[in-house]
Amino acid sequence: MNQTARTRPEGSERPLSAAYDTALLDLDGVVYAGGEAIAHAVESLGTARDGGMHLAYVTNNAARTPETVAGHLTELGVPAEPSDVITSAQAVARLIADQLPAGSRVLVIGAEGLRVALRERGLVPVDSADDDPAAVAQGYGGPDMPWSRLAEASYAVARGLPWFASNTDLTIPSARGIAPGNGAAVQVVRIATGAEPQVAGKPLPPMHRETVLRTGAERPLVVGDRLDTDIEGAYVGGVDSLLVLTGVTTAAQLLAAEPRFRPTYVAEDLRGLLVAQPAVSGDSAEGFVCGGWTAAVRGDALVLEGEGEGERVDALRALCAAAWSSAGEGSCGLDAGKALARLGW
């Protein structure tokens, strides 16, 4: 997709919850981590919903069914219906159903969410490479998925069966830190077979297609914590995005982002949905200003000059403008250590 490289986060005079009709929210690292609600998530989503914004939950995690996810969100204080949840299991099931006739057997390497999604598309989940499957579907099976399931996938893929993966996220946030994701398990099968799967999840088009079909959003805003799935998925889909710093992405990674990973907006957490987004002014010669903070390139470093009266995320927005403008179409390699340490990042 040919797009002009973003050189700074954008501003919005209206709260994002009013400027967009639908929030396409990632779950892990945005709404919850390790099953527990992230700070400010419940209240922020409630206020956005009460103001008329439609909330849809779009996750690359294929392990749980939409009913289970909706129930969990409701327990956390975020009322949701199964129809509000879109998973990579649904996206990969549609991808498989587009290529195989109804009633085809599919070897499932994953959890119940993937099985339910396949049945929804008229496909028959099986458990063994010896059950005459027509394809292999691999999704996140949870932290206790046995090694034997990866071996079963390898046997089937090595025989030449089409191989589909719900997503290839290498990591997933948990209450104790960052854990291996489905992409790590996919890599095991890739090493064993030398094959490559067809992938459905973010940031690839099948997931965007599934989301549009199920939500009917006219002016969506993708909200996520990952540059390489959420933000890149928005870029590929040609829609705006909000990065929240409550999950995988660090401030340093944001500054170094290449164009396809640069979000439209940046916020510390989901409270960013409820407020206007201050614009970044200035240029490379005079420095970039946001919330009174001034960011500039000095030699081989990004620096903050003066004392800003705005929040620290305003300083980060200014630093993004300095970094992205300097990098252009590439990745910024300037040292931002002192500037980020000053902000507590």
Image (spheres, grey):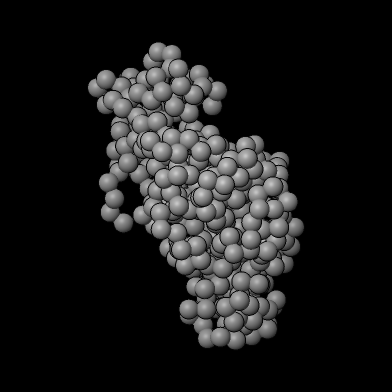
Which residue is farthest left? 285
Residue 117 appears at what percent x and percent y? Answer: 61, 71
The residue depicted at 71 percent of the width and 48 percent of the height is 76
Q: Is residue 226 left or right of residue 330?
A: right
In front: 136, or 341? Answer: 341
Which quadrant is home to the N terminus? bottom left
Residue 245 x %, y %:
54, 37
Say if 85 sits above or below 260 in the image: below
Q: Residue at x 43, y 63 (%)?
A: 205
Name the spot of residue 279 as percent of width and height, x first: 36, 31
- Nearer the observer, 157 or 57: 57
Q: For this view, does 240 lie left or right of residue 51?
A: left
View extreme (front): residue: 51
- Front one among 196 and 277: 277
Which residue appears at 32% of the width and 37% of the height? Answer: 7
Examine the image and state in which quarter residue 309 appears: top left
Q: Is residue 71 above or below residue 289?
A: below
Q: Tell how many labels.
A: 0
Q: Would residue 166 appear left or right of 16 to someone viewing this image?
A: right
Name the quarter where the C terminus is drawn: top right
Q: Position of residue 107 (x, y in %)?
A: 64, 76
- Using the rendered image of the protein, determine whether residue 192 is visible from the camera's viewpoint: no
Whether residue 316 is visible, yes or no, is yes
Image quadrant of residue 163? bottom right
The residue drawn where x is 58% and y is 42% is 47
Side (left or right) of 213 relative to 153: left
